[in-house]
Image (tube, rainbow, N blue to C red):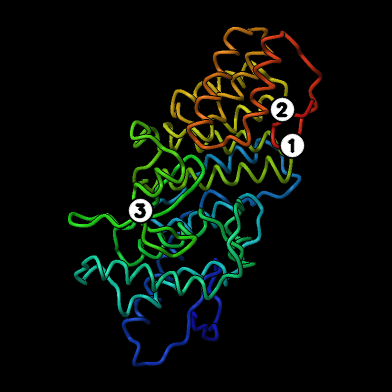
Amino acid sequence: MIEKEAPCFPRKQGAFFILLPLRSIPTYLLILACTCNFIRCTEQLGKQSAETLSTGDKYHQAQQSAQSQLDFSCNIVHVTLELEKRWGYEVDPVTEQFTNELSASLSEHFSAKRTFDQAAIISYFETLHEEIQGAIKMVSTYHSILSTCLRYGIVDCDVLSMLYISVSQDLGLPVYGWLTPTHMFVAWIDDEHKVFWETTTGQATSLQFYQDKYQLADSSLRVGMNMRPLGRRELVAVSYFNLAKEKQDMEQKNDLALLLNQRAIELAPQWANPHTSQAFLYRQMQESGKALESVEKSIERFPYDSGPFQLHARLLQEQDCPEEALIAVQKAISLMLKENKAQDLQQLSDLQKEIANGVKKPRYFLKNGAHRQ
């Protein structure tokens, strides 16, 4: 469990100090350094974000906020929380200070000055896992807003991975985020070690573990942002993408979701997922030409996921291109078989027959861009 001391006087921007015994001078100094760094980050982040977005703000205000520069030298949790504040989400001081507490708790035993062998790396991950588990209530499949997750203790793979990365950034340790098309995890990578870690279970894994679980061929490794270490800009792109999903799925604000996805694309131009999300949004907005262009960009960046090919087939069908649509749906079926998703094949089989017969049924769009007939 994380020991939570009584806070002293709140500082502007939401950071605060923690009371510690005098014997814990190194820990106090790290907390002080983290807090000062956070204040510096929030001050820099706030220079261009004096206007916080609220529900009724106009599109051009959102555009200005999205284009404001973020200070990527801050750890990824602080950057993401600042991003969410700009878009009108409540971030309380305790939530802002959470990673500082984690970093301080681990600093007495783990720092960049220590020599790490395989056992020490595993010990670091296990200790961090225990600290985080003491502060959360459950692991969810997906939740897009970091501040909400931390406030209520409901986390997913993205949130957990960002906590690991942020604490490691504070301590100067070489821990990086890794992505599959549908999952995020972390790995310790230095000149002598490469240790993969599943944050949702707190277990050491391997590259082969993720290839087998998500049916990823060797040819798909390091394609786009898939299965390679992520840089700081790419981590921020994940935060923009998650915020876009919230605007799209929960708030039905498609114009803002498009804007946030575009920012993710600018930060991580080789990442396929924001393009797929854009395609769903444009289709929902009945802009089929833009939807088709977006899904083709997604496939170009990662041609190993059945989902975009299925959407591609639908869009080609709607554009009266049945031959091309059949090719796309056949590719989706082939990939789905490799992904061990046999339970979803019936829907694709029905789509294939519908395209082959030249049948077009009325479509009723759902909030996530899918449809029912």
The residue sitting at 60% across, 51% down in the picture is: 144
Q: Exactly how many numbered labels are in the figure?
A: 3
Q: In the structure shown, which secondary structural element does the residue marked by tag 2 occupy?
A: helix
Q: In the structure shown, which secondary structural element does the residue marked by tag 3 occupy?
A: strand
What residue is disc 2 on?
Answer: 284
Q: Amino acid at mark 1?
A: Lys
Q: In the structure shown, which secondary structural element does the residue marked by tag 1 occupy?
A: loop
Q: Is residue 339 left or right of residue 319?
A: left
Q: Do labels 1 and 3 touch, CB within 8 Å?
A: no
What residue is disc 3 on?
Answer: 176
Compare residues 93 and 288 and report the one nearer the observer. Answer: 288
Compare residues 184 and 42 and report the one nearer the observer. Answer: 184
Expressed as whole percent of the image width and height from the top left, the position of residue 65 reads: 58, 43
Q: Is residue 43 visible?
A: no
Compare residues 47 and 286 and report the one nearer the observer. Answer: 286
Q: Amino acid at mark 2?
A: Gln
Give the number of the disc on residue 367: 1
